[in-house]
Amino acid sequence: MVKEYLANSRIKIKFLPSYSPNLNLIERLWKFFRKKILYNKYYDTYEKFKNKCLSFFKNINEYTDELSTLLTENFQIIGEQISKI
């Protein structure tokens, strides 16, 4: 039933091996988020922290250039590169 639905929809399923967060696009976004919002930052109240987090996602278009290089599907097959060495 699921395979039939996917065959007739625009949804494409990509297999990701387990323990490979570098291939998972949402993990890349979370890493970018932590870099911009959390790293070397101190928020003296929870409210300031929460507002900064919400502001990041409301204004995510400001980071389009940076995110466009991180959130791609340009995966490299490492096995082929290693066998050439």
Image (cartoon, rainbow, N blue to C red):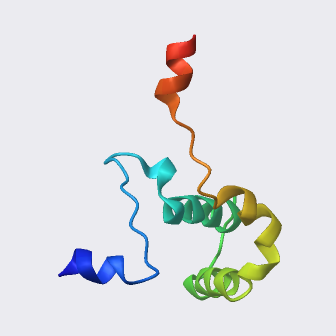
**Residue 42 falls left or right of residue 81:** right
Is 18 or 51 nearer to us in this picture?
18
**Residue 18 falls left or right of residue 50:** left
Please determine whether, in this image, residue 19 is positioned above or below residue 50.
above
Is 33 or 63 nearer to us in this picture?
63
The answer to which quarter of the image holds residue 40 is bottom right
Residue displayed at 64% across by 88% down: 51
The x, y position of residue 73, in whole percent, is 59, 56
The x, y position of residue 81, in whole percent, is 56, 23
The answer to which quarter of the image holds residue 13 is bottom left
The x, y position of residue 63, in whole percent, is 78, 72
Q: Is residue 71 visible?
A: yes
Q: Exactly how many numbered labels are in the figure? A: 0
Residue displayed at 64% across by 76% down: 44
The quarter of the image holding the N terminus is bottom left
Is 76 or 50 nearer to us in this picture?
76
Is 65 or 42 nearer to us in this picture?
65
**Residue 44 falls left or right of residue 46:** right
**Residue 16 falls left or right of residue 45:** left
Residue displayed at 73% across by 57% down: 69
Please determine whether, in this image, residue 6 is positioned above or below residue 23.
below
Q: Is residue 39 visible?
A: no
The quarter of the image holding the C terminus is top right
The answer to which quarter of the image holds residue 52 is bottom right
Task: Give the farthest residue toward the top.
Answer: 85
Residue displayed at 65% across by 74% down: 43
